[in-house]
């Protein structure tokens, strides 16, 4: 798993460096957008999925799209949070904040549909409270993701993302990645 992560990091860095080195930063050549997305996240881990189900998320993002080119870069910050009562004496809280960068590819000139691959730094905190005793896990991990989306006419877009993030804490390992779907709005 670590070998795949290293290869994906190197590949993404090469793609981003090629994009940046071929980019002419002129006002009419680069288009910047700010956006916000609301969505739902379903964790990969079956225990987290059984406890929390779908987790609501909110994302702010900033993109740099090349005019006349079929690629761009998207940077974003997302927030996932959900608290769940497992029993009258036991509850759990899931909080995750990924900061991500994604290389985007637009297969058509209208830039309606897009695909992307990216990396992120994921901060996760899982707290379980049983009979007033807290047990918490906080972790910082590097993860990767792929996305696919579609831009509608009035700055609306829909997007799906699959992420994989491995965290370890003492004697266990978990994948806190998952599948997310959302709808957003972009400002120019």
Image (cartoon, rainbow, N blue to C red):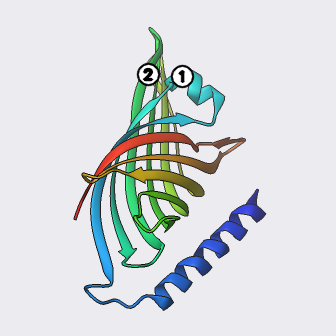
Residue 42 in the image: state x and y as whole percent: 53, 34
Q: Secondary structure at mark 2?
A: strand
Which quadrant does the C terminus fall into?
bottom left
Residue placed most toward the observer, 181 or 58:
181
Residue 102 in the image: state x and y as whole percent: 49, 65
Residue 43 in the image: state x and y as whole percent: 56, 35
Pointer 1: residues within 10 angstroms few (<14), some, or many (20+)?
Answer: some
Residue placed most toward the observer, 3 or 94:
3
* Farthest-out residue, front: 109
In the picture provided, is 165 more to the left or to the right than 30?
Answer: right
In the picture provided, is 38 more to the left or to the right than 89?
Answer: left
Residue 36 in the image: state x and y as whole percent: 29, 51
Location of residue 4 (image quadrant): bottom right
Location of residue 66 (image quadrant): bottom left
The reply to whether discs 1 and 2 touch (Cβ–Cβ < 8 Å) is yes
Q: Which mark is residue 103?
A: none
In the picture provided, is 34 more to the left or to the right than 115?
Answer: left
The earlier-in-sequence mark between 1 and 2 is 1
> Which residue is at a point 38% across and 46% down the rendered structure image?
79
> Which residue is at a point 25% across and 86% down the rendered structure image?
27
Q: Which mark is residue 84?
A: 2
Q: Which residue is mark 1?
A: 51
Q: Is residue 73 above or below residue 122?
A: below
Q: Is residue 89 above or below residue 184?
A: above
Task: Give the number of callouts.
Answer: 2
Which quadrant does the N terminus fall into?
bottom right
Residue placed most toward the observer, 139 or 60:
60
> Which residue is at a point 62% across and 26% down the rendered structure image?
47
Q: Secondary structure at mark 1?
A: helix
Pointer 2: residues within 10 angstroms few (<14), some, or many (20+)?
Answer: some
* Farthest-out residue, left: 188
Q: CA distance from mark 1 to mark 2?
A: 7 Å
């Amino acid at each position: 798993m670590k070998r795949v992560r290293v290869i994906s990091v190197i590949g993404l860095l090469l793609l981003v460096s090629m994009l940046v080195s071929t980019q002419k930063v002129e006002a009419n050549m680069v288009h910047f957008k700010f956006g916000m997305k609301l969505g739902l996240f379903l964790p990969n881990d079956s225990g987290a999925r059984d406890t929390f189900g779908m987790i609501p998320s909110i994302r702010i993002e900033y993109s740099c799209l090349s005019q006349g080119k079929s690629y761009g870069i998207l940077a974003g910050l997302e927030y996932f949070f959900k608290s769940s009562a497992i029993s009258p004496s036991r509850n759990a809280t899931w909080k995750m904040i990924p900061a991500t960068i994604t290389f985007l590819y637009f297969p058509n000139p209208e830039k309606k549909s897009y695909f992307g691959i990216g990396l992120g730094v994921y901060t996760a905190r899982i707290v379980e409270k049983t009979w007033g005793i807290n047990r918490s896990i906080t972790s910082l991990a590097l993860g990767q993701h792929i996305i696919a989306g579609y831009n509608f006419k009035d700055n609306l877009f829909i997007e799906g993302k699959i992420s994989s993030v491995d965290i370890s804490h003492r004697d266990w390992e978990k994948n806190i990645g998952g599948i997310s779907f959302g709808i957003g709005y972009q400002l120019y």
